[in-house]
Image (spheres, rainbow, N blue to C red):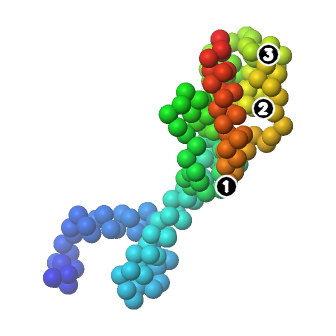
Amino acid sequence: MLKMKEVEKVKSKLDTRTKFVTQKYNINKDITDISSLAKLNKQVKKKINETAETRWKVEMQRKSSLVLYSESKEKYGLSEIIYSNSKASGPLADCRAGMLNTKTLRAKYQEIENHICTMCGEEEETMVHIVLNCKELGKRNVDIKIALGFTENVVWKEVNETKKRLAIWDNRKG
């Protein structure tokens, strides 16, 4: 049946989809051992994961808001789930994506004259300032990557402190 399909040049939806996936992930070039279906499946999954991770890294580099994220993350996906159903999980996700709604970030999109922190009134209100340096919240002596949970082994004490600070800041921001 397959030979007849080939001779008659009949293409099914499966053929079209298979061709698309093999081209998208360059599968034909790297698959060497096709002695069993299990080995073939393993090689195909490996190639797809490698290609997806490479694309993920390239796409992160193209987005200016993801500079810290791309410098910190080494693997695709979460090593541990750090978000919960708490009020601070949203701002934590914003921090990790470089999009915390600080005065400095808002000034990029609208006219804001005063960029000084609403809470301490001393420094420019940036994500790093809120997470680490705001005197009103208490200065922290920790790396920003640890504070945001970017390390392979999450330091929960620091991530929870970050969430607590973000919840306080989010309630008071002007």
Disc 1 on helix, strand or loop? Answer: loop
User: On screen, 37 above or below 89?
Assistant: below
Q: Name the quadrant containing residue 55.
A: bottom right
Q: Residues within 10 Å of mark 3 (few under 14, many from 20)?
A: some
**Callout count:** 3
Answer with left or right where residue 114 lies relative to residue 38: right
- At a point 18% along the width and 72% down the height, the residue shown is 10
Three-letter residue code for mark 1: Glu
Give the percent coordinates (x, y) of residue 25: 46, 65
Disc 2 on helix, strand or loop? Answer: helix
Q: Badge 1 is on which residue?
A: 152
User: On screen, 13 above or below 37?
Assistant: above
Q: Badge 3 is on which residue?
A: 120
Marks 3 and 2 close (CB-CB < 8 Å): no
Q: Residue furthest front?
A: 157
Residues at marks 3 and 2, CA–CA distance in whole angstroms: 13 Å
- At a point 55% along the width and 39% down the height, the residue shown is 83
- Earlier sequence position, callout 1 versus callout 2: 2
Q: Residue furthest bottom?
A: 35
- At a point 79% along the width and 42% down the height, the residue shown is 143
Q: Badge 2 is on which residue?
A: 132
Three-letter residue code for mark 3: Cys
Give the percent coordinates (x, y) of residue 112: 69, 12
Disc 3 on helix, strand or loop? Answer: loop
Three-letter residue code for mark 2: Leu
Visible in this render: residue 111? Answer: no
Q: Residues within 10 Å of mark 1 (few under 14, many from 20)?
A: some
